[in-house]
Image (cartoon, rainbow, N blue to C red):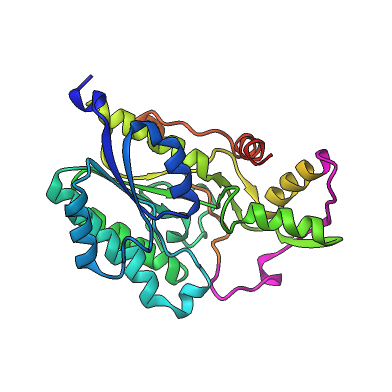
C-alpha cells in the first residue's frame, strides 16, 4: 500500500444535483474532502472560471459528473451541449494533467449509432446519431488528446431515485394511466447511478493502492440486457408487489414514438475490459433495480 492509500483525498466533483453526482457524494463521503461544485459555484461555459476554481481547490482527483443530458433539446441547443460536454471536459483534462492527478469522466452509449448487432467494445468506431452524442464524443476526444491519468467511463440508461429519469417517470405514469405504450426495439442495460458510484469508488481504491489498471476509455454499465419495455415491465412488477396500481403495458417500435433526436437501437456495451484491466465487475441490471428500489422505500 502507498501513502496515497492512507491519507484522506481531496476530490473535486463537478455537478451537484445530477443522479451520478448525488450517488458519488454518498459513496465517496468517507474517502476525504469532497468539493462538490454545482452551477452556482462553477460556470462550465467559462474555461477561465474552471481553471481558476481547480487551481484554487488543488484537488488530488477530479471527477467530472456534470453534463448536458437533455438529448432532444440538444438538437436545437448545440452550443450549450458542446460547451458543457466537450469544452469543459477538455479543460478539466488539461488541469488534471497540469496537476499530475487523475480525471474520471462519464460518457455515454450515444456515441454509437446502434447499428451493430452485438455489444459495443471500446475498439468500435463511434458514430453518434445526434448532437448530444456528438458533444459527448468530442469531450472524449479532447480528454484523450491531452492524455495523462484519465478514465472515460461510458455508461447507459442511467436512473436513480432522484432527478428526471425513466424509473421515476414510469412509476408515475404506470399509476396514473390504465394503459401505456413503451418502446420495445431499443436494447441496452439500465444502469443505476449507485452502481456507477460504487464502481467509481472501486477504481479510486485501485488507483490509491499504487497498482492502477491501464488509463483510458472503458464501458461501465450493469450486466445483462433488456428493452425499455422490459425495464418498464420490471418496474411495474414491483409496483404490483407493493399493492399499487399498474397500467397495462403495450410494446411499440421506435417508429411509433418519434423524437427530435434519434436513439440507438443497440445500446449494449461490452464491459469485460473494465473487469480485466481494473477488476471491476458489474451487478446485473435487475438486481441493481431491486437494490435501488429498496433505498426508495
Quadrant in the picture for residue 175: bottom right
Q: Nearer the viewer, residue 226 or 5?
A: 5
Q: Residue at x 47, y 60 (%)?
A: 110
247 inside magenta stretch: yes
Q: Is residue 54 left or right of residue 217?
A: left
| Rendered location of residue 159, percent (x, y) | 57, 50
Q: Residue at x 31, y 39 (%)?
A: 33
Q: Is residue 150 left or right of residue 81?
A: left
| Rendered location of residue 84, percent (x, y) | 35, 66
* Camera sees residue 292: yes
Which of the image's four quarters has the N terminus? top left
* Camera sees residue 120: no
| Rendered location of residue 187, percent (x, y) | 61, 52
Which of the image's four quarters has the C terminus? top right
Q: Is residue 78 left or right of residue 189?
A: left
Q: Residue at x 59, y 56 (%)?
A: 165
Q: Nearer the viewer, residue 263 or 116?
A: 263
77 inside magenta stretch: no
Q: Nearer the viewer, residue 80 or 37?
A: 37
Query: Looking at the image, is 269 positioned above or below residue 30?
Result: below
Residue interval drawn in magenta? 240-262
Q: Residue furthest bottom?
A: 76
| Rendered location of residue 149, percent (x, y) | 21, 43
Quadrant in the picture for residue 111: bottom left
Quadrant in the picture for residue 181: bottom right
Q: How many marks?
A: 0
Q: Residue furthest top?
A: 1
Amino acid at each position: 500500500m502507498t501513502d496515497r492509500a492512507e491519507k484522506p483525498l481531496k476530490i473535486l466533483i463537478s455537478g451537484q444535483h445530477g443522479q451520478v453526482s448525488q450517488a458519488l457524494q454518498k459513496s465517496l463521503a468517507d474517502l476525504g474532502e469532497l468539493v462538490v461544485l454545482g452551477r452556482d459555484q462553477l460556470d462550465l461555459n467559462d474555461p477561465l472560471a474552471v481553471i481558476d476554481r481547480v487551481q484554487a481547490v488543488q484537488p488530488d482527483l477530479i471527477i467530472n459528473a456534470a453534463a448536458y443530458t437533455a438529448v432532444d433539446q440538444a438538437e436545437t441547443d448545440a452550443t450549450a451541449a458542446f460547451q458543457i460536454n466537450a469544452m469543459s471536459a477538455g479543460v478539466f483534462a488539461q488541469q488534471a494533467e497540469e496537476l499530475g492527478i487523475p480525471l474520471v469522466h462519464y460518457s455515454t452509449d450515444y456515441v454509437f449509432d446502434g447499428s451493430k448487432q452485438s455489444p459495443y467494445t471500446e475498439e468500435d468506431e463511434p458514430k453518434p446519431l445526434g448532437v448530444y452524442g456528438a458533444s459527448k464524443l468530442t469531450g472524449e476526444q479532447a480528454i484523450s488528446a491531452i492524455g495523462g491519468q484519465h478514465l472515460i467511463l461510458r455508461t447507459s440508461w442511467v436512473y436513480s431515485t432522484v432527478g428526471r429519469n425513466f424509473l421515476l417517470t414510469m412509476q408515475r405514469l404506470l399509476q396514473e394511466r390504465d394503459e401505456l405504450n413503451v418502446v420495445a426495439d431499443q436494447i441496452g442495460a439500465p444502469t443505476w447511478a449507485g452502481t456507477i458510484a460504487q464502481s467509481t469508488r472501486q477504481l479510486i481504491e485501485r488507483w490509491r493502492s499504487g497498482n492502477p489498471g491501464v488509463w483510458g476509455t472503458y464501458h461501465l454499465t450493469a450486466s445483462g440486457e433488456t428493452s425499455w419495455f422490459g425495464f418498464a415491465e420490471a418496474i411495474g412488477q414491483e409496483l404490483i408487489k407493493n399493492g399499487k396500481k399498474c397500467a397495462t403495458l403495450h410494446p411499440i417500435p421506435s417508429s411509433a414514438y418519434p423524437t427530435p433526436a434519434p436513439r440507438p437501437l443497440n445500446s449494449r456495451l461490452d464491459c469485460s475490459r473494465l473487469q480485466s484491466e481494473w477488476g471491476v465487475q458489474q451487478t446485473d441490471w435487475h438486481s441493481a433495480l431491486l437494490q435501488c428500489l429498496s433505498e426508495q422505500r
